[in-house]
Image: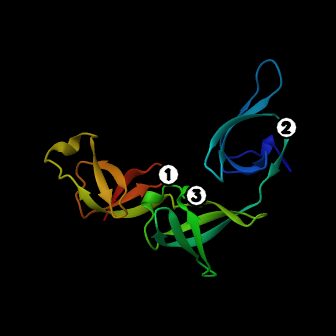
Amino acid sequence: MATTADFRNGLCIEMNGEVWSITEFLHVKPGKGAAFVRTKLKNLRNGRQLEHTFPSGVKIDLARVERRPYQFLYKEGADTYHFMHSETFEQLAIEESLISNSGLLKEGQDVEIMYHVDSDSPLTCELPAFVDLLITYTEPGVKGDTATNALKRAIVETGAEVMVPLFIEAGEKIKVDTRTNRYSEHVK
């Protein structure tokens, strides 16, 4: 058991029979009335977002979750992804809906799969914060266009579309932020 004083981003709690992750929280002490905590929660089973207000000091149930290292092997069909545990070599198949930003996932990529310990079932699959990807197609840049913050679309080796600066060409490697699906920097 924990209280609202223990809230932090990424904390997993059980509420209404579901496992939720706290994405944002704010302690509020109005001039009149009792204090409360305003939160934004993400359901780890289906990805649904929820805003919920807890009275300050209320007891909450913590969910027992565990992060396990896996390596992406291959995609089968339209939405089944196969992974291998990095230490035990056990293989696992999960649905695309459990993977955050699956378009940036390439073979051999290391990921973390979050498990609910009590039911031993996978909740989410998280990519590293940044991945290096090769540009397979983009429109050529025009000389002199690099002075602005204009962006153009580019297709990376996984087939995902990423907006990149005008000076990026096909065949170059870039670093992409997997949380926002945005260009981060040029890789040499």
Instruction: Say what secondary structure mark 2 lies in.
Output: loop
Q: Is residue 92 above or below residue 20?
A: below
**Spot occupied by residue 10 in the image (x, y as percentages of width and height):** 66, 51
Q: Amino acid at mark 1?
A: Arg
Task: Rate crowding at label 3 as few (under 14), some (14 to 19) or many (20 or more) other CA atoms within 10 Å.
Answer: many
Residue placed most toward the observer, 163 or 76: 76
Q: Which residue is mark 2?
A: 57
Q: Which residue is mark 3?
A: 98
Q: Which mark is residue 15?
A: none
Lateral position of residue 68 relative to residue 18, left or right: left
**Spot occupied by residue 22 in the image (x, y as percentages of width and height):** 68, 45
**Spot occupied by residue 1 in the image (x, y as percentages of width and height):** 86, 51
Sequence-wise first label, 2 or 1: 2
Instruction: Say what secondary structure mark 3 lies in.
Output: helix
Q: Amino acid at mark 3?
A: Leu
Lateral position of residue 146 relative to residue 121, left or right: left
Task: Rate crowding at label 2 as few (under 14), some (14 to 19) or many (20 or more) other CA atoms within 10 Å.
Answer: some
Tag nearer the camera, 2 or 1: 1
**Residue at screen point 64% across, 69% down:** 68
Lateral position of residue 35 relative to residue 105, left or right: right
Tag nearer the camera, 3 or 1: 3
Q: Which residue is mark 1?
A: 179
Q: Quadrant of the C terminus?
A: bottom left
Task: Rate crowding at label 1 as few (under 14), some (14 to 19) or many (20 or more) other CA atoms within 10 Å.
Answer: few
User: CA gap, disc 3 to disc 2?
Assistant: 32 Å
Callout count: 3
Instruction: Say what secondary structure mark 1 lies in.
Output: loop
Q: Amino acid at mark 2?
A: Gly
Lateral position of residue 92 relative to residue 104, left or right: right
**Residue at screen point 46% across, 67% down:** 77
- Colour treatment of the image: rainbow
**Residue at screen point 76% across, 26% down:** 29
